[in-house]
Image (cartoon, rainbow, N blue to C red):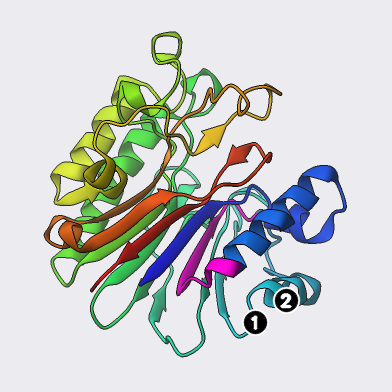
Amino acid sequence: MKLISWNIDSLNAALTSDSARALLSRDVLATLSEHAPDVLALQETKLPLAGPSKKHLEVLHGYFPGYQVQWVTSEEPARKGYAGTMFLIKEGLNPQVTFPKIEGPGTMDSEGRMITLEFEHCFVTQVYTPNASDGLKRLADRQVWDRNYADYLAKLDEIKPVLATGDFNVAHTEIDLANPISNLRSPGFTQEERDGFTHLLSRGFTDTFRHLHGNVTGAYTWWAQRSKTSKINNSGWRIDYWLVSDRVADQVTISDMINSGPRQDHTPILLEIDL
């Protein structure tokens, strides 16, 4: 299987705007279409409650003809046009689709953060993990989410192997971001969030990038848009992951980033696995 995950940070803008950033986003979509993945996971779609419009789907199918589209959006009491996730699934693959809720605190379960596909030999599930927010206002809720999410993946893993991806909003170790010392209490690098990710892995999951590449440094999936030089200087964070059940980790052949060119923010990540 070839699978790609990308936090697109507004599918709506990418498909309907002619801004410089939207054009860069469409360049990335063109690159992903060349990979012809079996499954493409998209996070932070920021679509309205009704989901993708006819225009959205026309543009998407221009890049990915014949793909089935599954999506979930933010709904009340959560904010409209917030978060949201989507799967594009290659024609001929017909997984069972569920939209899990994990008893997340506050409005987290209403923010369109998870979709799970069940195939014959595995689950493929994506998540857009809630950010701890400025001032760490959501850190306590985030810790509850992390525990519940780990329980959810562990339950899937009891049934068949799991391939879990998405924007996990945490740099796990100091080598997963360029400036660890100055970010010790920044959202995404608090000890609490890092411990939550350690706990998730301890439940039977492998960080496939580290499994294949070891302690390589300077490998990131996100560069802040606020700094015009963050990507040029490679001052980034690795917060997007492909995790797999420990028992199939050695069947992973590729786990890497896909070059998104000059576009800052998230870059797509690729997984290839022989199941």
Determine if residue 102 is in view: no
Instruction: Tell me the residue at 47%/41% (across/down).
Output: 130
| Residue 154, percent from left and from top | 18, 57
Instruction: Tell me the residue at 72%/76% (across/down).
Output: 62
Q: Give the residue type at disc 2.
A: Gly
Secondary-structure class at tag 2: helix
Which residue is the site of mark 1? 65
Which residue is the site of mark 2? 62
Secondary-structure class at tag 1: loop
Mark 2 touching mark 1, by CB under 8 A? yes
Q: For mark 1, does the 10 Å Cα neighbourhood hold few (<14), some (14 to 19), or many (20 or more) residues?
A: few
Vertical side of 155 occupied by 218: above or below:
above
| Residue 148, percent from left and from top | 28, 48
- Does the magenta-highlighted stretch encompass residue 188? no
Write the start and end of the magenta stretch as one range.
Answer: 34-45
Vertical side of 29 occupied by 233: above or below:
above
Vertical side of 95 occupied by 49: above or below:
above
Q: Give the residue at the far right of this rendering.
A: 18
Asked whether 176 or 36 is in front, the reply is 36
Q: Give the residue type at disc 1.
A: Pro
Gap between marks 2 and 1, in whole Å? 6 Å
Quadrant of residue 21 in the image?
A: top right
Determine if residue 191 is in view: yes
Q: Point out the image quarter for the C terminus.
A: bottom left
Q: Point out the image quarter for the N terminus.
A: bottom left
Say the numbered circle drawn on residue 23. Answer: none
Quadrant of residue 183 in the image?
A: top left
